[in-house]
Amino acid sequence: MNIQAEVQVGPQGRVVIPAQLRKLLNLKPGEVLIAHVENESLVFEKAEVIKRRLKARFAHLPQGMSLADELIAERRAASEGENET
């Protein structure tokens, strides 16, 4: 799936994604893409692709575990330790 297409940046910074790429990626009019810079390249991604990548990245964590609650508990314990000294 290595399709390349030349695009031109318009006067207001707009870029048109070529039809062959829109079809390949099933992009619909009005769909929102997330843009970011990666290794000096501009990358556009669907939000669902980013969500899948993040879920895979944190899949090793136990279900139902709240990282926020765990961090708060650690901070409270550290604070209590500081108050005792």
Image: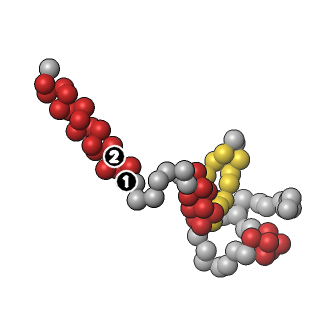
Residue placed at 74% from the left, 70% from the top?
A: 25
Q: Is residue 54 above or below residue 74?
A: below
Q: Crowdedness of circle 2 by 10 Å Cα count: few (<14), some, many (20+)?
A: few
Residue 58 at x, y percent in the picture = 53, 52
The quarter of the picture where residue 8 lies is: bottom right
Q: Position of residue 70 (x, y in %)?
A: 33, 46
| Residue 34 in view here | no
Residue at position x 63%, y 47% in the image: 37
Residue 44 in the image: x percent, y percent? 66, 59
User: Which residue type carries mark 2?
Assistant: Glu
Q: Amino acid at mark 1?
A: Ser
- Residue 17 vs 44, above or below: the answer is below
Residue 19 locus on image (x, y percent): 80, 74
User: Label 1 near label 2: C-beta < 8 Å?
Assistant: yes
**Residue 75 horizontal side relative to residue 6, left or right:** left
- 74 above or below 13? above
Q: Secondary structure at mark 2?
A: helix
Residue designated by label 1: 66
Along the viewing direction, whichever of 25 and 5 lies nearer the viewer: 25
Residue corresponding to mark 2: 70
Q: Residue furthest front?
A: 62
Q: Quadrant of the N terminus?
A: bottom right
The residue under the point 69% across, 41% down is 39
27 sits left or right of 75 in the view: right
Q: Is residue 62 visible?
A: yes
Q: Residue furthest top?
A: 85
Indicate the secondary structure of the residue bearing disc 1.
loop
Using residue 80 as the reference point, say whether residue 41 is left or right of it: right
The residue under the point 47% across, 53% down is 62
Q: How many marks?
A: 2
Q: CA distance from mark 2 to mark 1?
A: 6 Å
